[in-house]
Amino acid sequence: MSTILELQGVTKAYDQYTVVDNFNLQVTMGELRCLLGPNGAGKTTTMDLITGRQKMTSGKVIFNGRNISGMTEHRIVQQGIGRKFQIPAVFKDLTVRDNLQVAFTRTTNPFMNMVEFGRGGGRARLQEVVELVGLEKRLDELGGNLSHGETQWLEIGMVLTQNPKLLLMDEPTAGMTEQETQKTSEIFNRLKGEHTLIVVEHDMTFVREIADIITLMHLGKTLAEGPMDEVENNPKVREVYLGTEGISDAA
Amino acid sequence: MRVSRRNFVKGAAVGAAGVAAAFPQLYIKDHGQAWGAKPWIYKDGNVKVGLLWSQTGNLSVVENDSTQVSLFAIDKLNAEGGIAGKQIEPVVVDAKSDIKVYSEKMTQLILRDRVATVHGSYTSASRRAVMPIIMKWNHLYYYPTCYEGRECMQNIINTGPLANQHSYDLVPYMVKNFGPKVYLVGSNYIWPKESNKNVKVWLERAGGEVVGEDYVPLGGSEFSPVFNKIRQQEPDWIMSTVVGDSDIALHRQFLQEGFKSDKMPIAALTTGEIETAAMGHEAGAGHFLSAPYFQDLKNPTNEWFVDAYLSSQYGGGGVTHYNMEETYLGILIWKKGVERALEEAGGDWEAITPRMIRDVSGNWNGQGPVGLSDEESPEGKVWIDPDNFNIWLKPKIGQCGSNGQFTIVKEAPEHVGPDPFAIYPERGVCKADGLHKPDGTIQKDVL
Amino acid sequence: MSVHDFWTPFALEPFISALIIGLSLASIWLVAALGLTIIYGTMGVINMAHGEFIMLGAYITWVLQYFLGFPWLLCLPISFVIVAFIGWLVERGLIRHLYDRPLDTLLATWGVSLVFIQSIRLIFGGEPQYIDTPEFLSNVVQIGFLNIPSMRIFIFGMALVLVGLTWALLYKSNFGIQVRSVMQNPQMAASFVINSSRVYGLTFAYGAGLAGISGSMFSGLKTIFPDMGLGYVVEAFLVVVTGGGELFGSLATAGIMGEMFSVFSYFTNDTFARFVLFVLIVIFLRFRPQGIFTPSMARR
Amino acid sequence: MHKTNLYHDKRAQWAVYAIFFGVLALLPVWMGDDPFTLNQYARYGVFGILALSVSLVWGFGGILSLGQGIAFGMAAYGMAATMQMQYQDPVNDPIPSFMLTNELTALPTVWEPFWNTSVGLILSMGIPVLFFTIFGILIFQARLAGAFVAIMTLAMLGAWYNMAYDMQPFTAGFNGISPPSAFKAFGVEVDPYSSMIYWVSLGVLAALTVSTKLLLQSKFGTIIQAIRDDAERARFLGYNVAFYQVVVFALGGLIAALGGMVWVIIVQYVSPTALEIFFSITIVIWAAVGGRMSLFGAIFGAIFINAAQSYVGDEFQATWFIILGTIFIVVVRFLPKGLAGLFEYAISFVPNPLPAPRTSVNSDIAK
């Protein structure tokens, strides 16, 4: 299987401290990678650096064989990277249908979109996504009126609508009930294989449920990488999390 | 939805075409023709006159008094029997100190209220905003404020001094009494610049020189950069064409900057009794103003005017200044014009048109232009120029005392005539029917 | 328009005077912008009625002097107190309901300013008013070839005093600690028993009071009329926004803007100087929207 | 019958537009030949156009522009120049009167193109749009938003205001330009006191409203509303947010510019007052009171406030600005969606009599 995303020596430094420090990562096509680590480990920043939301100090991001470092955000997205934010972000004054409609981008050119009245193409895709995230009954509801879990699913759905090659999910289950989390992990397991996913998550049950390989970050660096059991038993990890119950608790 | 939208567009188009076919008068008929053909004064009605000033907003400071003095004049005329037995009916509108409203209210006065004449506006901007409407309806406007001239329109009569009359006496007087070097300060618009062009011409004749020239934004109140340059150039006197609130700031900062009015006085064209009251008497004292009228003028007509006006229900403002007096003259002169028009129309009120009132105000039937005698006009005898329909007057120079009132220090021995193109002889001469250009053509409505 | 009319050639002495005038202008703009800086900087509120607070300060001074015969210097603190109270009422009645809608505060306060202007015009009429200043502020101080009106020196001094007081209040006093903690994290501040609604109310009142005192001072220099606020508010805004809502940002911006304006208008004229200044500010804000001092931060 | 609010039903909205403009189109039949009313209503039409531009840019695009007057004023000056040059004679009288007295001996180059009416019209429309595009790129590339945009547009407006009256030889300064004759195009004279002017004003308003409505129903319209709600989310769906914002801003400029052109045809006058800060903020007031999130609401607000100002009795004249200010405070405080929002709320109690539109994703996602 081929590598879809590769981070080479990615570094993000502010005046006094370095948030991401010479970080390397390789993700293969179709994999579901979990990014773990305590607060301040640089997980979200790494996602920001991949998607161009923050400019990296040095390093390189290769996506699908192409160097995407330095591209603007929307160009990176257009390469096929979707991103779900930590704080769920949907368009609150638009209906669920419109939210998904906006996410379905046949063209991003404003002038082309002026004569695009949304008929025809994309319907099938929307139908698929709506069923996947289970919002069939909520299509005419305003984004702002959804429950927390629904909002998360809508955002996941929006990103999925774009059919990206790589999905970046920042805490997709944050604030969800157990039931909702269960449903989310089902969604993720269906996505695996077809899509490549990088998930930042704190909920270890959820991680166990979905992850192939996890990368554990600490102070902007890789601390350990591998399947869950391997990482948990890694002596370095035990050292860092000394006195705690292991990563499950610390994360 | 696709079908219904297409249907909607189709339906709308069909509907519009149907309407167009059903009511051809909507787009064919020229409403103006019928509208203009109706009489402006009815046999058994009053003579309606429009008063277009601002009662609210920032211009109301000046313009409210203009309305009041017009009403006072109309009351006076009505008490004396009106115009040939007809009462004058003022239609007062409020222009709200907003250019858009001036224009809207002017259409209202002409088209809805159907007044025979409109008197109004203080600023040149509002005059120019309403003139296209006046010209379109061939109506008549009386504009009472000093202005720059160099216009030649056939639907207006002006009762304030033109730029060529305003500083005619002032400049030689100042040069003689204070010295040749003058610094010109003005508000940044056309009237001050135009006035200063005239000033420069009179200066050259009087042997003076301009050592500096500066314009500040209208409403601007920061004069220290200007005073910085003035201090550097050491002029003998300052020529001010700063207007409104800025004028008050200019005089106050003159004091704060440590200048003295006896060493370097300001000679102004608009700093009248209203302004000296607002700026404080010590700030006004010692400076000069050229105007055709001062509240303190000593003659029986003016004494009557000041007493009668200030004790009337309209005199709440407490002063009579040049602009109010010019407004008052406008109403009186207009009344004489209507009387002549009635005669011209053979006694048929309904045949009088606004334009006719203007035409007969000039040199009509060998009677000469309309004017006011010493007994009628507070500033003394004045008359309308039969060619350009501005006013002949005697400019006077007053020096502000410590009470905010002006003492007349010089009065022109002869009347000075208005010449809107005095410093532009190459553009032609303004006559009753238009601007007679040097190449022999006549251009109407030079705005 | 000939080039010479438009362009004044350089000469040393008047140019130095122009620089001094720039300082004076800067101090006027700074005083006008100070209250706004506090309100914008700590609360993020764009108070379009700020110019009218200045106007109210001027009218209060005029009323106190004209009707009650108060000496001018005494009017300054009184108008501070009264306008601060009016500001507090506005914050109570309107602004506190709009904290999560900053654009709406901009619009609502514009409505407030309309009401203030017209009310004052109805009560006192539209005529410009003036006040008498004490003898020692009505003369000119001569230093070499420089002639500086003492009133301008006074305002310059007052500007520094007010900046100093405000700095002390914000950074040295207990109240200042509360203000800054509420600014940074309202929830956490609440857990330290800081009443954030009270802090906001007092901050706004203080900002309004500063506008009032500046109105009092301007009444000694310029004319008082209902629309006068408009003449200050736009410049004040530009100072505040360009300064990033920081006290010393405003100080620096006012200084730079005052000098630039004075120098431009020395070489050309007032109106053109204003045009150049406005355009420069727009361009500056495009490249440093966070203001001159504040370090660039990642958005969101 | 179904539960969606009739207010949001596209068919009902189009029906309201059809009825509104249909009634307005027939108004001259009732008004007869009253040139004053025709002229006055034509003016209201321009105010409606301006409010429409604010509604598009602010209500839907989320960009609070206090500088709509820039486009309005620029276009107004362009139109005044066009009309002035129609009046001038290329041989005998090639230079407008006000220029001759400003020491100009030849027509300035910037005025030359206005000899040609078509070119004049294109410039009047094109220059504001070009300026708004450049200005928009400047602002939105830097990702400025909210109050910053408001302040920057305000400063820019102030700059142009100063420019307009400082460049006296070209603009006649404070006094303004009053073209002495009515506008003529393609052999037709647009008499500002005839039903013609009413048609022109109403026609432009209706055409712009319908186009804007269609625009908002296109995907573009949904995207700009998405950007208004959350620009960052939209950006991470692959949209070049700045590009969209610049386009919306420039379209708002175009609408305001068309308003400025019609305005000068009606009043035959332009002065720097068109660029006054006060005026531009007043436009925002109209849109806010009527409801910025509704094109119809904004237009209604503009017409309603202006008609009220024209027709309230004398006893309210002095307090007019207090009334206006208070209405504005109340609307902003309690009715962020303006009168349209109030109406939306009221009508939500009325059952929707129209048959339910097909809503499932399968059938039609289009709106």
Image (cartoon, helix red, strand yellow):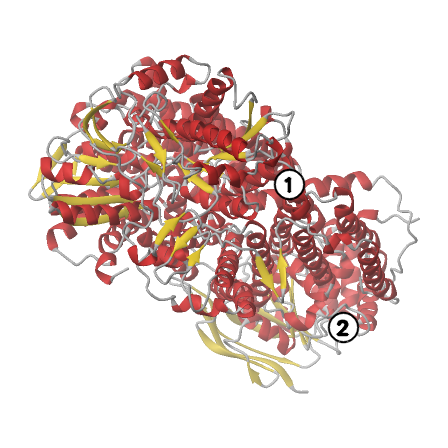
Amino acid type at image mark 1: Val
**Is residue C16 or residue B319 the one in the foreground?**
B319
| Position of residue B240 measured from the top left corner of the image (x, y, whole percent) | 24, 40
| Position of residue B346 measured from the top left corner of the image (x, y, whole percent) | 57, 33
**Is residue A90 or residue B291 the one in the foreground?**
B291
Let me know if residue C48 appears in the view. Answer: no
User: Which quarter of the picture shows residue B325?
Assistant: top left
Residue D180's place in the image compared with B155, above or below, is below
For disc 1, the neighbor class at 10 Å (few under 14, some 14 to 19, many from 20) is many
Residue at the disc numbered 2 = A191
Residue at the disc numbered 1 = D289
Host chain of mark 2: A
Let me know if residue D84 appears in the view. Answer: yes
Side of B410 where C201 appears, left or right: right
Side of B187 where A93 appears, left or right: right
| Position of residue D67 measured from the top left corner of the image (x, y, whole percent) | 50, 52
Amino acid type at image mark 2: Leu
From mark 1 to mark 2, how far is it between C-alphas? 48 Å
